[in-house]
Amino acid sequence: MQYERTMTAFRCIPSCGVDMAKDSSVTVTLRVSEAVRELLRAAAEKDHRSMANMVEVLILRHCEANEISVSPKRTTKKSA
């Protein structure tokens, strides 16, 4: 994972084909045990992150470590 210096902070640049700054957000609902939720909360708190951001970071780290990548979505223009 690389980091890019911005005006006031560093932005994570994962090598798995996802640009977190340019991707639009979608809602994902997960069902986990109470123990897993508490572990997520504790991990997020320790890293000063939201739980949603912690899930995203963990997934990106896992994908990078296991060389999993996705192709960027191609945008198509609709003809008028």
Image (cartoon, rainbow, N blue to C red):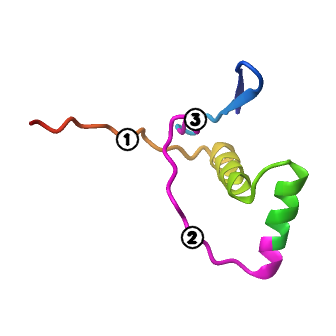
**Does residue 6 lie above or below 67 as drawn?**
above
Labels 1 and 3: the sequence-earlier one = 3
Q: Residue at x 42, y 40 (%)?
A: 71
| Element type where label 1 sits in the image | loop
- Mark 2 or 1, which is nearer the eye? 2
Amino acid type, label 1: Lys
Task: Give the magenta range.
Answer: 18-37
What's the CA distance linking mark 1 and mark 3?
A: 15 Å
**Residue drawn at 87 percent across, 56 percent down:** 45
Q: Earlier in the sequence, mark 2 or mark 1?
A: 2
The span from disc 2 to disc 1 (Cα, nearest Å) is: 22 Å
Marker count (numbered):
3
- The x, y position of residue 57, in whole percent, is 70, 48
60 and 4: which one is in front?
Answer: 4
The Cα–Cα distance between marks 3 and 2, rounded to whole angstroms, is 21 Å
Label 2 Cα neighbours within 10 Å, binned few <14 / some 14-19 / many ≥20: few
Identify the residue at image location x=82%, y=56%: 44
Label 3: which secondary element: loop
Q: Amino acid at mark 2?
A: Thr
Q: Secondary structure at mark 2?
A: loop
7 or 13: nearer the viewer: 7
Give the residue at mark 3: 21
| Coordinates of residue 69 in the picture (x, y in percent) | 52, 43
Residue 73: numbered disc: 1
Name the magenta segment's main secondary structure: loop
Q: Report the side of 10 relative to 25 (left or right).
A: right
Cβ atoms at labels 3 and 2 below 8 Å apart: no
Instruction: Tell whether 66 sits left or right of 77.
Output: right
Q: Nearer the viewer, mark 1 or mark 3?
A: 3
Query: Vertical placement of 53 versus 13: above or below?
Result: below
Q: Which mark is residue 29?
A: 2
Q: Position of residue 55 (x, y in %)?
A: 69, 57
